[in-house]
Amino acid sequence: MDGSGLDDTERALLSAWRVQQHPDPVERELLELHRHWQRHPARRPLLAAELLDTGELASRLLGVLLGSAVGEFAVLGRVGQRSTALLFVLEGLIRAHTAARSSGAGDPVTAALDGLRRWLHTRGVPWRDCGSAAPAPNGPLVEAPELRSRFSDDPTPLTALAKVTGGHPVGSRQHPINTSATATSVPLGAVAALWSDDPGVVHALGGDLAALTHGHPRGHQPGGVLGVATLWLLRGHDLETALRQGISGWQAARTELGAAVRLGRLSPAGFRPGPAHLARAGSSGLDSLAVAARVALACQDDFDSAITSAGVHDGDAASSAALCGQLIGALRGPTAIPAEWLDRLPITPLVERLATDAAREFGPHPDESAAWERRYPASDAVAPAAAGTDYRTGLTSAPRSAAARDRFRGAVLGGAIGEALGAQVAADSWAEIQDRHGPGGLTDYIPAGFPSGRLGSEAQLLLFCVEGTLRANIARRTTGLDDPIRHLQHAFQRWLHTQHLSWPRAAGEFLRETPEPDGWLVGQRALFQTRNPGRTMMRTLIAFAKGQRPMGTPAAPASDSADSGALLRAAPAALWSDDPAEVFDLGTRAAALTHGDPTALLAAGTLGYLVSRLMLGEDPPEAVAGALEQIAPHRGQQELSRRLGAALRSSADRLDPESLVRELGTGASAAEALAIGTCAVLATDADFDAALPLAANHSGNSAATAAVAGVLSGAARGAEAIPERWITQLELHAEIDELARDALREFGPQPPDWGERYPAT
């Protein structure tokens, strides 16, 4: 075979199997099998999914959806309401996740309710009576004829949705919409497993999805149990482990569900529970899940027998069969389902497409195109659903949202702008500032040629820290090295080289690895300007270059300095991890490379933590409250906690410059500078034009305090919210933004091959 007419995947597959240059019948057979699997994902075994780089998530999720549909179909003889509602809820979650990536705001419960409104329309209800704000239903499912039916074997979901469209508050676990305990909405809980890697979040979401239509705990809590069990199955765990993990989240049902798991586990080989064994099965969600768990464990190697057993009792047989199908489908993938069932099921192709789309959206490489957002548009809800959990911070690992990316750019630009503004009055008292700039003090750059906003030494170092973090991630994904500290030290030494030291004098031990300073940033000659760098920075980095001291650590820091120069370098740590606690730790370690006072290290970690939380869309007061909780267990946190607490209190009073210094300090230390900058952001609701002047106008270290305010305001509002004049008058603003965008690409879903621009040395 010459390779013509093959796609890239097929060529790679052929290359992997080719052992000779001549056509081989085995190769042809392999390619035909591959193409068959591509056309029919439900016939593709899990091993093939992994080999073909389609991922187990897609196959196991397809097993969940098809298992549910086939189980219900086997009992009812038609595509039922459980399966169709599940598809519309999944479509809603895809929309919510897409919105969360693009705008930072996407509520899965609201989006699921919108999906159920579209599902209600397919039940024959006119769109105007479905309670949606959208002029017409949209999305790939609503027009599918195979999903339209007026058949319903349980009216509970329909009547609950009718109440909502009539003005009744949306149902939730905290505020039940009815007292129904039936099982028809429990299968919805399975798709909650896609939203988060946190079992607690999944349990809450699974229950909230079912509670949209079912108010009794026995009708909605099993949805949370199912969600957690599905989460573990999607990760490849065995069925008993998955069920026990799910059950652990619902104390009230441990006895009943635990007994079902035990009976299923102890079933003899070949045993199939029959009507006599399930004679006491009821119709509640708890009853149906217990039947499904027992039967699935007993029959996990035989889908046909499992569905037959789960569907022959006097309770809600359709629900228990659907739940049993979901569990076995998640465990073994779609190939567990006999081919004749897939051929008979009218919605198999539609389910295959939706499962593929869901796996793409919730996987590591989602589609960020405009066509995708048109296919899965944002929520059309009238008002947010009433779930008691904020699901914005529970997202699965995925590329940061467009809003979060904009906020990181804002943090980097804001820090540089803040220092450039504050440096102009850093040596002046408040009285001197008023004498020179008027009663209101400094409100803009001082016109002094172009650009007016000159980069300070801390902004220079911030840029090198961004580059060092970027290069550390290249090493992480190419070599497995998962500690960025050495890369940050290397970045510090490259900055030292820009302060008029030759590379052999600045490099220290890195000279062996990099005989010349490397990378794009050190090639920007405009950075080779000495802007009054701090003595601590210069002294410690020169000592490292001379071999007089090793890299500093929190346990053995490079100095005992507490000055504010420790702060800005912590901001890029927000890229390294999605966990704010890990960001906090990295921020403290980055500070310890040159500083050593425990309060200064905690202050640096806190700045990184705040940037991380603000990038996730938290309001500044919530982020500061979280930071106080984060630092509380640490030794030596009293001063920092006191100053941050004072910043929270003082922000409500909008302190004048004298009171600001009296209450929070001069900004000479890291803790003082963090408190003043934070107070300015809180007092102005992160308004850039108001926060930076407030942080700069006082008798203290205006450069450091305004830089902190710039970082936090930019992280809270984003680069697009920074008034243009601040950016256009900033020295090297285009290069700063280019570096920030490069860093975001590196930490995005498809980082490029940077070559010599950012070597992973």
Image (cartoon, rainbow, N blue to C red):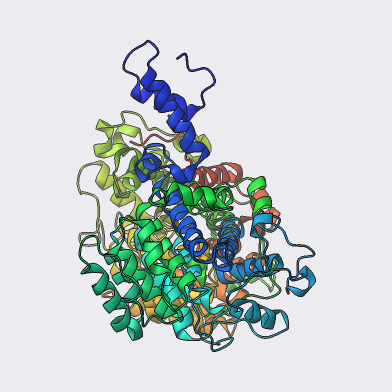
How many labels, in total?
0
- Camera-side residue: 331 or 15? 331
Quadrant occupied by the N terminus: top left
Q: Is residue 371 above or below residue 434?
A: above
Q: In this view, does 377 lie above or below 343?
A: below
Instruction: Name the residue: 67% across, 46% down.
Output: 371
Instruction: Name the residue: 52% across, 27% down.
Output: 7
- Camera-side residue: 718 or 457? 718
Q: Is residue 15 left or right of residue 153?
A: left
Image spot of residue 130 (x, y percent): 73, 73
Q: In this view, does 384 lie above or below 494?
A: below
Image spot of residue 185 (x, y percent): 52, 73
| Residue extending farthest top | 22
Instruction: Name the residue: 70% across, 66% down.
Output: 380
Quadrant occupied by the C terminus: top left
Q: In this view, does 738 lie to the left or right of 543?
A: right
Image spot of residue 499 (x, y percent): 41, 42
- For residue 698, say whether it is visible: no
Q: In this view, does 431 lie to the left or right of 462?
A: right
Image spot of residue 749 (x, y percent): 48, 45
- Camera-side residue: 189 or 261? 261
- For residue 295, say whether it is visible: yes
Q: Hey, which quadrant is residue 596 in on the image?
A: bottom left
- Camera-side residue: 449 or 494? 494
